[in-house]
Amino acid sequence: MTEEQARRVRVGVIIFLVLAVLTGVEYWIAVSMTGNLLPLSLIALAKVGLIAYFFMHIAQIRYREGGH
Amino acid sequence: MSSTAHTHGEGHSAHYPRLYINRLGYWLFLFSESMLFAGLLASRFYLQGISRPEELSQSLGLGITVILLVSSLTAYLSETAIAHGDRPAFLRYTLYTMVLGAIFLGGVAFEWTAAFQHFPPSSPFGTVFFAMTGMHAFHVFSGIVLLGLIYYNGRRGAYGPEDAWPPEAIVKYWHFVDVVWVFFYAALYLVA
């Protein structure tokens, strides 16, 4: 495994752990409080932002060279 | 005529490389797909408000969500591996992703058997529950088929650091399916 590949793997694992924690927080909010639409929406948006940026590399569409 | 068109095409490719066009077009495709799911999400709140049935299994919902989340990590590792020429890891993580996707579908099928009794498709919540989970499950199934395709091609020596767009596209699709579930999970299981 190259150094660059190892770095990307570390980033992926860290983002996964953050997403797992956010999912746990969502679950806790759901079972402990009602009127939870706003906090759940904010957490869902945060999760989608992380997935789009780190896993789907949405920033790549700015690079016309086609690289990373 | 054909000569002019050929020259015209070359001029465009000089400014917009193929990979850039592929990525931009693919994001437009995903954006159009998101409109379908946004409509389903809106219909859930229109028909049911912000209430949810007590019969929904919270533990099962959380379980299949975690499975899909783990599959997103394995899909990411698969894409990273082939982009760096690590074919064994690419094949391994692609296979893991397919298996996790199949387990997710099994969980949804299990949930459906109970859902038919508690909120049939003719009820307001049943309508949105079966439409949302059904449409999403169909996309997961499509993703598994597409992952199977790149797994098959990868085993035959296809793809590599200079030809990683097909796996990248399929993995993006898989992440998109996960993104949809982030919203659907919160809307169906958590909001109250």
Image (cartoon, rainbow, N blue to C red):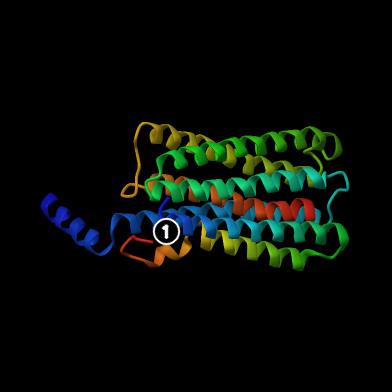
B84 vs B41, nearest the viewer? B84
Report x, y in % for residue B83.
Answer: 39, 50
Left or right of B27? Residue B70 is right
B113 vs B89, nearest the viewer? B89
Q: Residue at x 71, y 64 (%)?
A: A41
Report x, y in % for residue B177.
Answer: 58, 48
Left or right of A10? Residue B154 is left
Q: Is residue B124 visible?
A: no
Q: Is residue B61 visible?
A: yes
Report x, y in % for residue B52.
Answer: 83, 52
Image quadrant assignment for residue A60: bottom left
Could you classify mark 1 by the number of other residues whose Cα lies within 10 Å: few (under 14), some (14-19), or many (20 or more)? few
Q: Residue at x 74, y 63 (%)?
A: A40
Q: Residue at x 18, y 57 (%)?
A: B10
Report x, y in % for residue B77.
Answer: 50, 49
B118 vs B95, nearest the viewer? B95
Left or right of B119? Residue A4 is left
**Disc 1 sits on a residue from what chain?**
A
Residue type indicated by callout 1: Glu
Q: Quadrant of the C terminus of chain A?
A: bottom left
Tell me the SS state at disc 1.
helix
Residue named by callout 1: A4
Q: Residue at x 50, y 38 (%)?
A: B92
How many numbered discs? 1
